[in-house]
Amino acid sequence: MEGNELDSSRKRVARLLRLVFEGKLSAKEAREKWPDKGSTDNDLNYAFHILYYFEEDGYTRDRNEAYAKWQKGEIKNMISKLSQSEAS
């Protein structure tokens, strides 16, 4: 994937994560709209997996405030990193 395409994918993923974080899109819907499922970009792959855990861990987040804070922080950090388009 070329630089401009990668930047575009990273920004699209940041938008999807933001929508999930804000409760405007489900994790499943975000994964269905994922721009590059076969990416070699470690951040995009990590973000994709974050969505699985976010979806599966709702029960734990509801009962464990520290875990909820950590998980939401991971999503916010990934949104910020992907928005800056710095591939790793």
Image (spheres, rainbow, N blue to C red):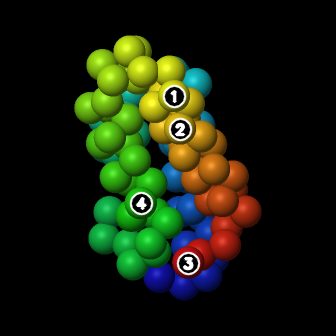
Q: Which mark is first along the chain, 3 or 4?
A: 4
Q: Position of residue 76 (x, y in %)?
A: 62, 42
Q: Which mark is residue 46?
A: 4
Along the viewing direction, whichever of 14 and 68 lies nearer the viewer: 68
| Residue at 40% over, 15% down | 62
- Identify the element where label 3 is drawn: loop
Q: Residues within 10 Å of mark 1 (few under 14, many from 20)?
A: few
Residue ID for mark 1: 66
> Which of the two discs, 1 and 3, sits closer to the camera?
1
Mark 2 → mark 1, Cα distance in angstroms: 6 Å
Q: Residue furthest bottom?
A: 2
- Label 2: how many Cα within 10 Å (few below 14, some 14–19, many 20+): few
- Tag 1 near tag 4, CB within 8 Å: no
Residue count near mark 4 (Cα–Cα under 10 Å), binned few <14, some 14–19, many ≥20: few
Hey, what amino acid is under mark 4? Tyr
> Of the residues tagged 2 and 1, which is closer to the observer?
1
Query: Which comes before the other along the chain, label 1 or label 4?
Result: 4
The residue carrying mark 3 is: 88
Q: Give the residue at mark 2.
A: 70
